[in-house]
Amino acid sequence: MKGLAKLYRMGEVEVHALRGVDLDLFAGELVVLLGPSGSGKSTLLNILGGLDTASAGEVVYREKDLTRAAERELTEYRRHHVGFVFQFYNLIPSLTAQENVAVVTDIAKRPMKPEDALSLVGLGERLTHFPAQMSGGEQQRVAIARAIAKNPDVLLCDEPTGALDSTTGIKVLEALERANRELATTTVIITHNADIAGIADRVIHLSDGRISEVSVNDVKKRPGDLHW
Amino acid sequence: MLDRKLLRDLWKMKGQALAIVLVIVSGVATYVMLIGTMDSLNMTRDRFYRDHRFADVFAQLKRAPDSVKAQIAEIPGIGTAETRVAADVKLDIKGFPEPVTARIVSLPDVGQPLLNTPYIRKGRMLEPYRSDEVLVSEAFAEAHRLSPGDTFGAVINGRWKTLVIVGTALSPEFVLQSRPGAISPDYKRYAILWMGRDGLGTAYNMKGAFNDVILTLSRGARAEDVILRLDSLLDRYGGLGAYARKEQISHRFLSEEFKQLQRSADIFPAIFIAVSAFLLNVVVSRTVGIQRDQIAILKAFGYSNLGVGVHYTKMVLVIVVAGIAGGLAAGTRLGEALGGVYMAFYRFPYLVFELRPGVALTAAGITTAAALAGTFFSVHRAATLPPAEAMRPEPPALYRRSIVERLGIGRLLAQPTRMILRNIGKRPARSLLMIAGVALSCAIMIAATFSKDAVDFMVDVQFTRSQKEDLTVTFTDPTSKKAVYELMGLRGVTHAEVFRSVPARLRFGHRSYRTSIQGIEPGGSLNTPLDSSLRPISLPEDGIVLNDYLGAILGIRPGDMLTVEVLEGNRPVRQVPVVGLVKQYIGLQGYMDIHALNRLMKEGGAISGAYLSVDPRYRAEVYKTLVEMPRVAGAVVRKEEIRNFYDTQAEALLFFTFIATILGGTIAFGVVYNSARIALSERSRELASLRVLGYTRAEISYIFLGELGLITIASIPLGMLMGREIASYIARAISSELFRVPMVIGGATYSLAAAVVVVSACFSGLIVRHRLDHLDLVAVLKARE
């Protein structure tokens, strides 16, 4: 992405969420986007995921310019190339764990089986539970299974551990790390929790709508070694 | 400050609020329209009756000298009595080839008429002793564009006479100007004429005599007592049996109409009120759900339970008050319009439309009470919500597999379809109420428009299956059977069957009913009574068959002996066995083999008239000849009677169908739109998540609108069943001696109702679809549930 800028208009106030971001993401890497709240990281993720469009600059995904894509093309992009994990899981309450994953595999081109995706996140035994019958960590792992089940090229995670305690959070990160390792999915995790940065290949610091620092971890930590 | 919040909240949900307001408007407007119309017709009628001194008791007789009038006046309980000459005449209207008959009634030459005073609309009153001047009924004058000064021909007692119209008039006696035995007023072919007593008396050989008595009762007198004495007095003058006002044809039609309006006013507004209470319940409970945190904060800052309760009650009241105000305004307009429609049937000199404060208050009171009752639990929940609990989000709903899936066919369903089924199953009560609400809109349509099918069926049975004649000819007096040969000799008459019609009072035990017995030719093909399965029956040689409704009135069954008190000639009283019951939707009659009736009357082969089949090519010629035949009192053309019936009904039917369609559509829209908006607010997060996961707009629309669609589709058969039930209640409620409404609902009525429901649902679906297309994906993901 090049010169990416985003200007929000909140009533009569203009908010510069992004002020010129240049960034390349490489296939298979695990990137942690670190920054305080309001630094623009969610905006960046939304634009990367085709949920939002930039005010200026361009995002190119495999020669396709997402900044000029129509609504239908963005849907297509999300449908076949991107997996999302959100802070508040966003599962469909009326569907079981397995069905929540199937919601995505039903429309994907080369999905894995929902059961396999759930096994990958350690929930092979809880296929028939509804969201209301699961803990927060379990729900988030269902969300990860849902995100990876389509074999996405890019996995975008917005504060995936934000609503969880550290023990549960670590389990969730293990699931993400495993998916990245075994499926070679380009994974972007945004967080304000600096401790998580240890598991990344690259850590990108964002503040005030700009990239302030990029660091490369020579040795990646395993999620199990993290503490916060 | 809370009030400002209230107004902004309402503004935010203006679409939903408006939909509910519209349903309330419909309910209140229907109520006001129906009750208002009934009130105004009632007031108009009462005022017209009072100002024009409508009689309480009526009697016709053969002929009595004027001296009898003094004897009548002596009967205790009589207020004012007036004697008249009245007769049926044939008219010859230029440029109108069909047979026209008229009832001609005398007015005193000297002084004002004491009772049943005509209201002169145009022209002037008759001049004394002018035998060529007449007043004509306004409806007839309008139908033929006749004005004072115009002339027309009449055959009065066999003699041709040219009459001059000096004025057009209305009378309390002929508010409904309908030929006896006819199914609806026929302004083209039936007229009322008023003529000076001297002129008419001379023409009918009634100088110094009368054949019609009208009288009022003095205060506290009983009509039954007066009738008994009057009958015994008039017996020797050929009295046909006196009857009270409630049996007077015009008055009776009016009363039946009022009953009909009252029944409709009982049913339809209740449905609207119930639906609006349900909608308010849904909306308020959702609003309370969404505003939990706001309630918590209000309470945290010291607002009392009562304060919060009052706040949400006000929200309900604002909607209700807007609905009531709109309903009163619309109802008054519609009432005036409906009054106008009725004025085409009922000839009043004026229409007093006035909305009684009581009616408005009742409408407002019932609506408000229903709305408050419907929202009581939601408001109560808001008021008593503990602040700490209110801070937390509502607990997530627990879903289950739907029944369809548990039956094992779930495997065949894709996730979106499962979501639809589970969402319906999650709140079964709400889904059912929603189905019931939409079903009611369908039912309202059916109940309000089925009368067309019923009328079609009624006409089909009466005029196609039972009566097949082209023309019914009636003689002035019972005549020898030979008279029919004269008719058969007319060019164009292909077939004739004679009949004898005898006025009689039928008595069984303590119950009695005044009607006529129709003697018809056994094995005839032009007038055949039908059994309960509408198959023609052959009349037995002896005994009488009664209309089933008449049988029920008398409480008589086949095998019982019926007492027949003939009201004509020697007035014999006979015992006749009832041998069967026949189905007949219009009128109440008994049928006998004409020979049996002749035997009962101890007369030879006397006939009252004949049914004719006429070659269409010679119809006009036959009509013309009939006018000229002195013995023929009049003729009725069956086809014209049917067409006229539809013409008179058309406007009213159109009015009701139009109103019903709007109202049915309003309910369907109100229910579907509100439910959709509520569901959208509950599920926008889920739908946005799906969009983020790559679902297209069309796919999430399917998931969301599919649920509404399924509910709409499920509600249609239910609505049809409910519509049928309501229609059948109405049919039973408004069935009377004049006509019975058959429970027949045609495919077109069902289809129209279903179509209105579907179109309204699609319309609300489209509005919501617009919102679905503009879901804010990012905002939804940020917020916690």
Image (cartoon, coloured by chain):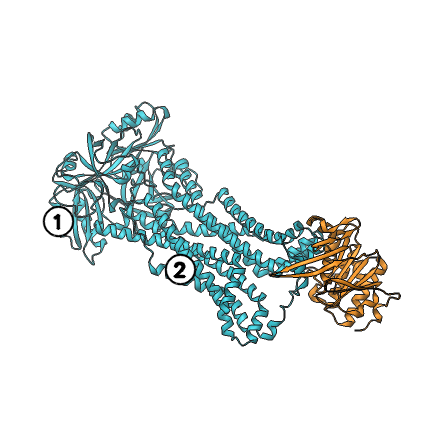
Query: Which image quadrant: the C terminus of chain B?
Result: bottom right
Task: State the mark number for residue B71.
Answer: 1
The residue labelled by disc 2 is B363
For chain B, the rendered hue is cyan
Q: In the figure, is residue B290 to the left or right of A56?
A: left
- Chain shown orange: that is A
Of residues B290 and B754, which is closer to you in this image?
B290
Of residues B255 and B175, which is closer to you in this image?
B175
Of residues B463 and B19, which is closer to you in this image?
B19
Q: Is residue B320 above or below residue B302?
A: above
Q: Secondary structure at mark 2?
A: helix
Q: Is residue B316 above or below residue B386?
A: above
Residue B4, position as x, y percentages in the image? 50, 66
Tell me which label, 1 or 2, sits earlier in the chain: 1
Residue A6, position as x, y percentages in the image? 70, 57
- Mark 1 vs mark 2: tell me if same chain: yes
Regarding residue B707, the answer to whether it shows in the image is no
Residue B46, position as x, y percentages in the image? 26, 53
Residue A215, position as x, y percentages in the image? 84, 64
The reply to whether the C-beta atoms of the residues labelled 1 and 2 are less than 8 Å apart is: no
Give the amino acid type for the residue marked by disc 1 in the picture: Gln
Task: Measure the alpha-carbon separation of dots 1 and 2.
Answer: 52 Å
> What is the chain letter for disc 1?
B
Give the amino acid type for the residue marked by disc 2 in the picture: Ala
Q: Quadrant of residue B470?
A: top left
Q: Secondary structure at mark 1?
A: helix
